[in-house]
Image (cartoon, helix red, strand yellow):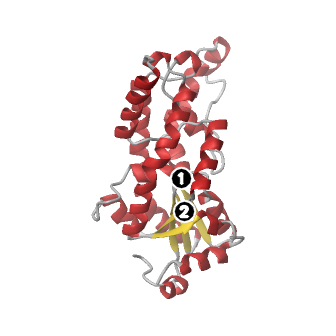
Amino acid sequence: MLYPTAASWRNAPHKRIMLFGMSGLGKTHLANLLRDAGDWFHYSIDYRIGTRYMGELIADNFKREAMKVPLLRELLLTDSVYISSNITFDNLAPLSTYLGKPGDTARGGLPFDDYMHRQEQHRVAEIAALSDTPHFIARAGALYGYPHFVCDTGGSICEVIDPEHPDDPLMTLLAAHVLPVWLQGSEAHTAELIRRFDRAPKPMYYQPEFLNAAWAEYQRETAQQPEQIDPDAFVRWTYARALAHREPRYAAMARNWGITLSADDVKSVREASDIIDLVATKLP
């Protein structure tokens, strides 16, 4: 572990952590508090994916839709308009929109093969963005003079590594540079996340094996053909199962490489110093 004791963490001139866990439990909130302190560099994995690794794919998808409109088609072909993604740390909608949902195309769905192709693009991009962490640690210090660093990961990090393998190459790389910190939710948090998702289902990345099994099971349960499936209904049905699938993977990541913070603990955090104190309580 990068900081084997609370004292080593508190005394470290360069504090580096990686926040992971389900989206909606406070990762970005904590990262923003650290960034607002003025001496922490905030590296967002989802932002890096949506700009560096999938930015062109996202913009091309917008252009593909715009080309269906005669006026916009003419303007695009004459370079009279410019279409790009305005993705930010707090608004990742362009990335989610590109990932899409499988099912009936008349209801905004994607053919399953196209959907899986985009899922694979995200997997490759997420691994690349996570692998860039050491580069951004060095860049944050050399270019901007930030002594501390927080890596704000997406909820799917547990899907692109093997959490039970002690020599997983990506986690080995990350753990050598940052302290992995799991934000663990309670059953009440999980229920609230499910309710929130049910109100506004959004695309997300799933492990291929999990997704293929869920797609086949949903068709068996509903007796529907792929082209008949309501995309929102499928992702709602899948979400709770995804949470249950990810929980033990997060736990293994924390057990093998890092520490665990309760999402309830995070509620009391008001500033960067609170986060430093909270992390210290989880170290020997």
Dividing the picture into quadrants, the one containing residue 212 is top left
Please name the amino acid that badge 2 sits on: Leu
C-alpha distance separating marks 2 and 1: 8 Å
Relative height, residue 195 to residue 173 (above, below): above
> Label for residue 183?
2
Relative to 72, is 46 on the left or the right?
left
- The front one of 228 and 205 is 228
Which residue extends farthest top? 70
Please name the amino acid that badge 1 sits on: Met
Instruction: Tell me the quadrant of the picture where the N terminus can be found.
Output: bottom left
Dividing the picture into quadrants, the one containing residue 119 is top left
Q: Residue 265: where, in percent of width, then height?
A: 63, 69
The number of numbered badges drawn on the structure is 2
Q: Earlier in the sequence, mark 2 or mark 1?
A: 1
Where disc 2 sits, the SS reads strand
Q: Residue 205: where, in percent of width, then height?
A: 47, 41
Dividing the picture into quadrants, the one containing residue 194 is top right
> Label for residue 22?
1
Residue at x 57% of width, y 28% of height:
232
Residue at x 54% of width, y 62% of height:
183
Answer few, some or many: residues within 10 Å of disc 2's Cα (few below 14, many 20 plus, some between 14 and 19): many
Residue at x 66% of width, y 76% of height:
274
Q: Residue 202: where, in percent of width, then height?
A: 58, 37
Relative height, residue 42 to residue 269 (above, below): above
Relative height, residue 62 to residue 55 (above, below): above
Where disc 1 sits, the SS reads loop
Task: Check contact, mark 2 vs mark 1: CB within 8 A.
Answer: yes
Q: Residue 172: where, in percent of width, then height?
A: 34, 65
Answer few, some or many: residues within 10 Å of disc 1's Cα (few below 14, many 20 plus, some between 14 and 19): many
Residue at x 39% of width, y 25% of height:
113
